[in-house]
Image (tube, rainbow, N blue to C red):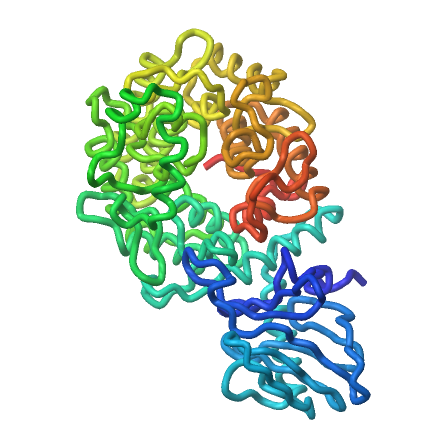
Amino acid sequence: MPTPLLDLVALDLRERPFTDRGSRLLVLAADDGDLWVARSEYETRLSDTIVLTALRIRAADGAALPIRAARPDRIAFAGGVHLAFADADTLVLTGAGARAEWLDADGTAHGAAIDGRLVLVGKDAPDAPTVLGAARARWATWFERMPAVRADLRERAALAWWTLGINLLPIGHAGGREGLVPSRFGYVGVWNWDAYFHAIALRHGDAELARDQIRILLAHQRPDGLIPDVVHDEGVLAETTDLPRSDRARLAEHVGSALGAEEAAAASFGEVVPVTKPPLTAWAVWKIHRAAPDLDFLAEVYEPLVRSQQWWLTHSDPDGDGLAEYLHPYSSGLDDSPVWDYGPRAEPPDLNSYLALQFDVLGDIAEALDRVDEAAGWRERAAAHTELLIARRWDGERFGTVSAGRAVATRTPLELLPLLTGRLPRAIADRLVADLRSASFWGERPVPTVAFDDPDFDPDAMWRGPVWLNVNYLLIEGLRRSGYPDVADELTERTVRMVAEGGGLYEYWNPLTGARAGRATTGFGWSSALFVDHRPATDRIRPV
C-alpha cells in the first residue's frame, strides 16, 4: 500500500515551516535547533512579527528532547511529545512527563509542564487525542483532493499540494474568501497573475476555491476596467501611490539604468501610474470552466472580463498604435527584467500575445453563454490583433521588444510567446520554435528568462536568467496551440524533472545547476500550482 501523501512531506522547519491552512503562525528552527514562532504578514519580515523564540522541550531529567520528525500535521519530539495546531490561532504541545521552555517576543522567559496538553499559543484547546486526530484528518482531507500524478513525481507533487494548502489564508480585503498567497515569506496577499496560476491547480481539487481567486480580484476592479495588482490585508495595490517605499527604492536601482542620465530622467515614472498584472484573467476563467463547467460563473464574470480587456487597449496604449504597453515594471510581472533597464514603459511581445489569446477565449466564453454574435466578434478581433502584432513587431527574424519607442537589444523568451495566439503563419511559428530549441534558449533545464548567450544573462538574478515555471508553462501551451506537441512534451518533461530534482518549490531556478537561484523565495505558490498541473503522461497541458 502506498505511503499516505501527507507522510511524504518532510518539513525541514527552515524552507518548509510547520503551519496550517488558514494560520498566520509559522514554526521554524533556529541554527541552534531551538524553535521560534512568527506571523506571516504582508510585506513584513518575520523578524518583525516574532511571537516567541528559544522553544525547547526537556525530559523530566532536564535533557533536551530532539525533534524526531516534522510532518504537515505535527512535529514529533522524542519522548512522545508533539506540537500541533488545534486551530489556526492555537498551537498545542501534547504528551506527558516533559517540560517546555521559551522566550516571549520581549525576552521574558517562560516554562511549563506538559501534562496531557499545553497551549503554547492561543487561548484554549481540546484534549490531546482530539487535537492530534483532528490535525491529521484535516490534512488527509486536503491531500485526498490532489490530482493524480506519475508515480515518480508523487513525492514532489505532495510537497507542491501541501504548499498550496499552507498558502491559503484569510485576507483582510478578500471579502471573507480564502486567498492563496504566493509565499508565506512576505508575499502575503492575493497577487494578480499569481492568482490565475494558482486557480489552474485548484480547479482539479476545489473548483469553487479556484473561482474565488478570480472573484477576490474582480471585487476590486476599478470602474475603468483595471484589475489591481494585489489585494492584501490593508487594501489594494492598483497604482504607484500604493507601492511600499522599499519597492520604489528597489525599482529605482535599475529602471532606466541602460540610458544616459538625461534620458533616464526624462523617462521616469509619472506622478501616478496604474499598476496591474498581465491580462490572463479570461484565460484562467476558461481553464476553470473546462475542468468544472459552471455557466453561472461565466455569466458572473463575463462583463468584468470584457472591461479588463478593453482597459489595456484604451488606457494602456499611450502611443495609440493599437498595441498595448506595460506602463510600470510591476504590471509585466517581470519587474527585474533587463527590459526595464531601458525605462519604465515597455512593450515586449508577450503582452499583445496575451490580449490576442484572450480575444479568442472571450469568444469561447461568449459562445458558451449563447452570445453567438459577440463570440464571432471576439474571434475577429483575435485575428486582427495577431495580424497587427506581426505587422508592427515581426522583423523577419524575431518579435521585437520596444521601450518608449526604443528597441531593446536583450533577448528574452517573451519574444517566443506569440505562439500562444495559435494564429501565426507557419513560417513564423517554425522560426520561433527553432529559436526556442537553439543554444540561446534550450538546455538541460530550459527556458532561461534571458537568453543563455545574451550579455545580460545572469543565472541567479531575478528575471535575468533563472527558469520560472510560469514562463515555461505558457510556452508549453503556446507550442500546443501552434501545433508542436512533441516539443511541448519535451519541454514539459525537462521542466518537471528540474523541479523534481531541484530540492524544493522555489520562486525560480538556476538554469545551469537546477538549484534554487539567488534570492528566490521558497514554498512558492505558482511553482507548486503549475508543477501539479503539468502532470506529464497522465493529463498533459491542454490549450484553452
> Residue 35: percent from the left, percent from the top?
65, 70
The residue closer to the viewer here, 2 or 332, is 332
User: Image height check: is 372 above or below 178?
Assistant: above
Q: Is residue 31 left or right of residue 423?
A: right
Q: Is residue 377 visible?
A: yes
Q: Is residue 453 above or below residue 257?
A: above
The quadrant where residue 239 appears = top left
Q: How many marks?
A: 0
Image quarter of the N terminus: bottom right
Q: Nearer the viewer, residue 387 or 68?
A: 68
Residue 64 image point, x, y percent: 77, 78
Residue drawn at 42 percent across, 55 percent down: 43
Question: Can you give x and y, in whole percent of width and height, for residue 510 in the image?
Answer: 63, 35
Q: Who is closer to the viewer here, 325 or 420?
A: 325
Report which quarter residue 501 is drawn in: top right
Give the answer, above or below, for where 149 lies relative to 515. below
Q: Residue at x 63, y 77 (%)?
A: 84
Describe residue 264's horizontal placement relative to residue 488 as left or right.
left
Q: Name the quadrant of the C terminus.
A: top left
Residue sitting at x 60%, y 42%: 534
Kindly identify the residue that appears in the image at 66 percent across and 56 percent down. Answer: 158
User: Which residue ends up furthest to the front in the rendered image?
Assistant: 107
Q: Say above or below: 322 vs 140.
A: above
User: Percent x, y for residue 184?
Assistant: 51, 58
Residue 519 location, quadrant: top right
Q: Is residue 247 left or right of residue 197?
A: left
Is residue 373 something that shows in the picture?
A: no
